[in-house]
Image (cartoon, rainbow, N blue to C red):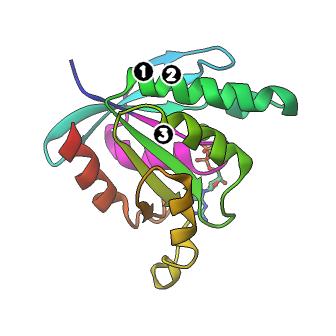
Amino acid sequence: SLPVVAVVGRPNVGKSTLVNRIVQSRDAIVHESRGVTRDRSYHKADWNGRDFVIIDTGGIESVKSKDTFAPRIREQAVMAAEEADAIIFVVDGSTGITDEDEEVAKILRKQDKPVFLVVNKKDNPATENDNLWDFYSLGVGEPMPLSATHGYGTGDLLDEVVAVL
Ligand code: GDP
Ligand code: MG
């Protein structure tokens, strides 16, 4: 079966925008599962001839209650770690690190799947390194600047991801 890449992160960091960019015109939702924490869509993708399935984890977006938020974020990250061969952890370069980012990072540090830390919303390549190194403190590796809306950085990311699949 195809290798699986999961995209995780708190709401609004740009996970779905990134998944849409990666799957581009090929988008075929292979499978969807519904439920508060298990809302996720599985898409077929390929890069440099390597086929894989990419999971957009969206369930926590629909959760409004503040006090149930952290457990759901943790559950999402745990499931991704169990199910995926590689994990793309998306954070928002325009806002900096939040408590929810720390929650996800804590889970990802405790497991041994390869993690790619994407610092999204770096729309201007001239300033892509501003505050980038702050994200090192999440302890999940080297932050990669990217703009899901413009596409900057997606090729470099996918080169690294398919290399571990
Ligand atoms: P998700 O909740 O993590 O799936 O995030 P979405 O993909 O739904 O994006 C949340 C918001 O961030 C939307 O308004 C997107 O248009 C915006 N967004 C996503 N990627 C980028 C980006 O690279 N740059 C900017 N400026 N906005 C982005
Ligand atoms: Mg989404």
Q: Earlier in the sequence, mark 2 or mark 3?
A: 2
Please rate how many residues cluster around mark 1, counting C-alpha atoms within 10 Å: few if below 14, some from 14 to 19, many from 20. few
Q: Amino acid at mark 3?
A: Arg
Secondary structure, mark 3, is helix
Identified at 59% across, 18% down, the residue is 38
Relative horizontal placement of residue 51, taking residue 113 as reference (left or right): left
Q: Are marks 2 and 1 in contact (CB under 8 Å)?
A: yes
Q: Quadrant of residue 75?
A: top right
Q: Does the image show residue 82?
A: yes
Pointer 3 residue = 109
Please rate how many residues cluster around mark 3, counting C-alpha atoms within 10 Å: few if below 14, some from 14 to 19, many from 20. some
Residue 44: percent from left, percent from top: 32, 31
Q: Are marks 2 and 3 in contact (CB under 8 Å)?
A: no
* View quadrant of ligand 2: top right
Q: Is residue 129 above or below residue 26?
A: below
Pointer 1 residue = 82
Q: Is residue 27 above or below residue 152?
A: above
Residue 164: percent from left, percent from top: 22, 41
Front of the two marks 2 and 3: 3
Identified at 52% across, 49% down, the residue is 90
Q: Which residues are magenta?
A: 6-28
Structural distance between the alpha carbons of marks 2 and 3: 14 Å
Q: Quadrant of the C terminus?
A: top left
Q: Is residue 10 above or below residue 92?
A: above
Residue 3: percent from left, percent from top: 25, 27
Q: Quadrant of the N terminus?
A: top left
Pointer 2 residue = 79
Q: Amino acid at mark 2?
A: Met
Query: Is residue 8 within the magenta segment?
Result: yes
Residue 129: percent from left, percent from top: 49, 77
Relative horizontal placement of residue 145, taking residue 75 as reference (left or right): left
- 92 or 109: which is nearer to us? 109
